[in-house]
Image (cartoon, rainbow, N blue to C red):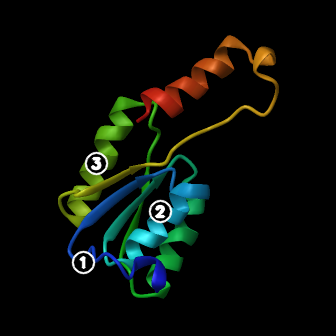
């Protein structure tokens, strides 16, 4: 476990947004290996089950949490769920993010707003 040898998060609670894939998933795994209990949160909740299983495979503790960072009510509910299930949050990783794969000048206003709502305002 060389990646976590330099820090111990035993007894801490982490909430990771965008934990269903990419960097958010990786952060969730690293935090759990360091001993944190992790709330793995994302819109794609079906993918969170695999992340939770992987964390549990090395005796970590994780709970899947539905979350849309563009919806303030969803954010409040996710924080409440994390704190009810795991305890007070001491680590937050804002890993949620989206991209539109096409040239910037071809983005519609709606696509650009969706990216900003998620990647900027969602933090």
Q: Residues within 10 Å of mark 1 (few under 14, many from 20)?
A: few
Instruction: Relative to 74, say whether 80 is above or below.
Output: below
Please state which of residues 15 and 49 is positioned toward the viewer in this rendering.
15
The answer for how far apart the CA atoms under marks 3 and 2 are is 18 Å
The residue positioned farthest toward the top in the image shown: 109
Disc 3 on helix, strand or loop?
Answer: helix
First along the sequence among labels 3 and 2:
2
Question: In the rendered image, which residue does mark 3 sit on?
Answer: 79
Q: Quadrant of the C terminus?
A: top left
The residue positioned farthest toward the front in the image shown: 6
Q: Position of residue 103 (x, y in %)?
A: 81, 24
Disc 2 on helix, strand or loop?
Answer: helix
Q: Position of residue 71 (x, y in %)?
A: 42, 31
Which numbered tag is attached to residue 123? none
Q: In front: mark 3 or mark 2?
A: 2
Task: Tell me how many marks there are.
Answer: 3
Instruction: Tell me the residue at 59%/25% (across/down).
Output: 114
Question: In the rendered image, which residue does mark 2 sit on?
Answer: 27
First along the sequence among labels 1 and 3:
1
Q: Residues within 10 Å of mark 2 (few under 14, many from 20)?
A: many
Instruction: Relative to 74, say whether 8 is above or below.
Output: below
> Relative to 5, is 101 on the left or the right?
right
Question: In the rendered image, which residue does mark 1 sit on?
Answer: 10
């Amino acid at each position: 476990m060389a990646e976590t040898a330099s820090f111990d998060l035993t007894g801490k609670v982490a909430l990771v947004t965008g934990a269903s894939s990419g960097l958010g998933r990786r952060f969730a795994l690293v935090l759990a290996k360091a001993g944190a209990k992790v709330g793995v949160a994302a819109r794609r909740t079906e993918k969170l089950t695999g992340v939770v299983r992987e964390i549990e495979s090395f005796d970590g503790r994780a709970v899947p949490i539905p979350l849309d960072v563009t919806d303030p009510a969803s954010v409040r509910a996710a924080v409440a769920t994390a704190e009810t299930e795991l305890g007070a949050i001491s680590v937050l990783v804002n890993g949620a993010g989206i991209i539109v794969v096409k040239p910037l000048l071809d983005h519609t206003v709606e696509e650009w707003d969706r990216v900003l709502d998620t990647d900027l305002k969602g933090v």
